[in-house]
Image (tube, coloured by chain):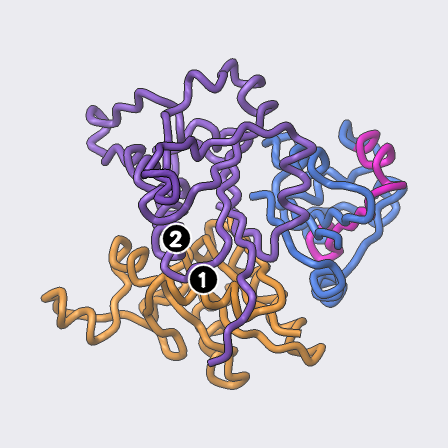
Amino acid sequence: MAERPKKTFLYLNRKAPYGTIYALESLEVVLIGAAFEQDVSLAFLDDGVFQIVEGQDASALGMKNFSKTYRALGDFEVRKLYVERESLAERGLSEADLMPIMWEDEDEDYAEKPSIRLVDRSEMTRLIGAADVVLSF
Amino acid sequence: MSTLHTVNKSPFERGSMASAFAHAVEGDAVLMIEDGVLGARKTGAFSPTITGRSGAVSIYALGPDLAARGVKAEDVADGVTIVGYDGFVDLAATHDRVCAWL
Amino acid sequence: MKFAVVVNEGPYTHQASDSALQFVKAALDKGHEIFRVFFYHDGVNNGTRLTVPPQDDRNLQRAWSEIALTRNVDLVVCIAAAQRRGILDANEAKRQGKDADNIAPGFRISGLGQLIEAGIEADRVVVFGD
């Protein structure tokens, strides 16, 4: 099969974790999708920003705390996690409330670099408009 | 390069409609489907938002969903074009991507 | 044009499956190709043949099965989501040691890679959900 240009996949995460399964099953798509070597970005906006807040403890729910999996995304070459500034602010959150999610740059002696990129709403809008495929969860 | 945004939530129940409009740019289209069509009522509180954006953004509502919910064509806000499922398909085909605001 | 459709909700509770079905029919009637319909989250529940809706209601599973069989549309149920929710084909039932399977005609169970492949192969992806 001939080599084809990569497509830009944008995963649009707008729902909080635990109340519904969308966040968890979205993450499962991202992990599987990583093997396809496309250009992958994750967008966190609206209540989706709660998916990556620090200090989640689901133990009393009897549910799995899957938030640690976001930290492993770098190992799957998923390095672009865009978080909308306005969505954080509306919810009384700031970047300091988010988990540190890093990836290792093998070209720079495995230096750890942040995967989270705070963007304002206009930049988020531009990202949506630049995607080939938007998968909404 | 333009986007078709689909919204299936009433703006009176959730923020999806407001988010969709906040992320729609000139040349984009917003299509209200399912409970989303409830935002299209002319006398409803969301209609000023629609009227305000209808110059830059093309706004559509799915006719079968309006009819099912008892919203008549004459009740729909100015600036909203009513389409059927075939129109939905055309909109999806003529824009570069479809972004669902669930 | 080549469309891929994603259905994230089961039948009856939410309109998503109905909307997707109407969209698929309209697209086919216009001469477009449906590369695949991918059922994810509770959407996998569209693929059980054991539903018995009232006589005067629509039968969504049968409607999807007809689309698959008469118009040659690929209906894929996500295996991970299906296992969580008890949707099994004969192979999976055997593999998991279950005493029955319930996948409906025209549906097949496969991996999430089928969703990514649909995104790569199709010109447009349209998502229906809640």
Specify the amino acid type for callout 2. Answer: Val
Seen from the viewer's position, the closer of residues A128 and A74 is: A74
Dot 1 falls on a residue whose secondary structure is helix
Q: Which one of the lettered chains is coloured purple? A: A
Q: Which mark is residue A106?
A: none
In the rendered view, tell whether residue A45 sits above or below residue B5: above
Judge from the rendering whether residue C86 lies leftward or rightward of residue C118; answer left or right.
left
Seen from the viewer's position, the closer of residues A116 and A24 is: A116
Residue occupying the point 38% across, 74% down: C107
Dot 2 falls on a residue whose secondary structure is helix
Q: Which residue is mark 1?
A: C116
The answer for which chain carries disc 2 is A
Q: Which stretch did the figure color magenta?
A: B47-66
Q: Kindly give the residue lying farthest to the left in the view shown.
A: C97
Q: Are marks 1 and 2 on the same chain?
A: no
Seen from the viewer's position, the closer of residues B89 and C124 is: C124
Q: Which one of the lettered chains is coloured orange? A: C
Residue occupying the point 52% across, 78% down: C67
Badge 1 vs badge 2, beta-carbon distance below 8 Å: yes
In the rendered image, residue B36, in percent from the top left (x then y), is placed at: 66, 43
Q: Which residue is mark 2?
A: A29
Q: Which one of the lettered chains is coloured blue? A: B
Q: Residues within 10 Å of mark 1 (few under 14, many from 20)?
A: many
In the rendered view, tell whether residue C38 sits above or below residue B68: below
Q: Is residue B102 magenta?
A: no
In the rendered image, residue C50, in percent from the top left (x then y), is placed at: 31, 68
Q: Quadrant of residue B78?
A: top right
